[in-house]
Image: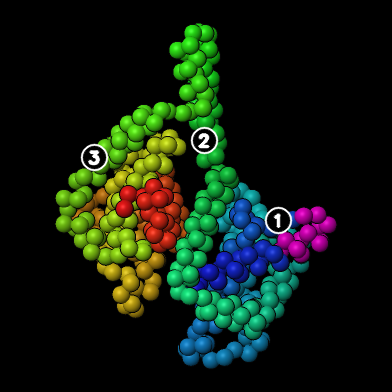
Amino acid sequence: MNRYIVAFFLFSFLGWVWESIYCTIREQKWANRGFLYSPICPIYGFGSIVGLFIYDLIKAGHLSNMEWWMVFIIGFAVSMILECFTSWVLEKLFKARWWDYSDIPLNINGRTSVPTSIAFGFGAILLMRVLIPLVDSGINSLPEPLLDVLALIIVSIISVDTTLTISSLTDFQNYVASLDEEFQNHMSNIVDRIYSNKNSFYNKAIQRIAVFKLSGRKNRIAKQLREKQFLELIKDYYKSDVIRQMDEYIQHGTTTTLEHCENVAWISYLINKKLHLNADEKELIEAAMLHDLYLYDWHDGAPARRTHGFDHPDIACSNAVKYFGISEKQQEVIRSHMWPLNITRIPKSREALIICLADKYCALIETIRLNKRFGLRH
């Protein structure tokens, strides 16, 4: 799985380089061809992953070696399907087109065309004969721990990047901006009222408000209150035998699955509090504590565990429904927490978005074993 993640990122980056150079030369001005903020074109990554999968099947002897014309036909067909489907999805979600082939002959609604797919067919030959063998050799030479960390970093970066991109293309950004404006106006009114009184007590108070700084003692009190409120929210889960079973399995590094779930719950709780996202606190913490309730050791090397990254959200959700009767909203939160690895399970609520981000952050910190230094509870 880590090999495919790293390959996806590399080919997405190469696709971005190719598209940006080609369009810059054609338009004679800088053209950033990425859909996301980072320098990647995911559509090239997905297409190349199809090629890598076929390459693996040939290498394992499940498929016979392909002639160049067979590779060309597959590349032609895959590019037409990917371009058409991706263009349609982006247009439906964001009411915009990232490419338009309407002025090219033999096009399909401007989404894809025969000439461009022919070019991609020849590109598939280059991919299968040269690029994939090179990338495969390079990835296989990496030590496994380094590959683990690389994959986690890549998933974290793409998750945050995709979330920010979608936020900027939807009403979420306007909603956050309106909240910020309301808060700033409220604070300005408070500041104006306090500055109208010139005695030293008020001047000291306004200095604290202006820089949003509390004394060390007040900071400690605020932290203790947050921890007390959080412990009150999670205490009942530790009474459950099912929940305690998670402590028998390692999740990342030396962190158990139960400790990971508490870490995710804690970071989710802080994100919600500090960013004033107003997510339902009870549902947020419950979904975080149950999001990895799959109850097995995914490191045991069993063949069924090879797709753990894709499968465990559904398994955890089924267990959470069975033992705790969670709501439909919480089920959606748990099923979508591995996005964008599970590309079709997009977070659809504030709770889902918060847990998706918190899970990536905790997984990365737990893997490099710097839990306490970066604010985790275990």
Cβ atoms under marks 2 and 3 closer than 8 Å = no
Q: Magenta part of the protein: which range?
A: 19-30
Residue annotated with mark 3: 232
Residue occupying image coordinates x 35% and y 29%: 217
CA separation, marks 3 and 1? 49 Å
| Dot 1 crowding, Cα within 10 Å, few <14, some 14–19, many 20+ | some
Residue 175 shows up from this direction:
yes
Residue 74 shows up from this direction:
no
Sequence order check, earlier mark of 3 and 1: 1
CA separation, marks 2 and 3? 30 Å
* Amino acid on which the number 3 mark rests in the picture: Glu
| Dot 3 crowding, Cα within 10 Å, few <14, some 14–19, many 20+ | few
- The picture places residue 47, in percent across and down from the top left corner, at 58, 71
In the rendered view of the protein, which quadrant contains the N terminus?
Answer: bottom left
Q: Is residue 55 left or right of residue 214?
A: right
Residue 32's disc is: 1
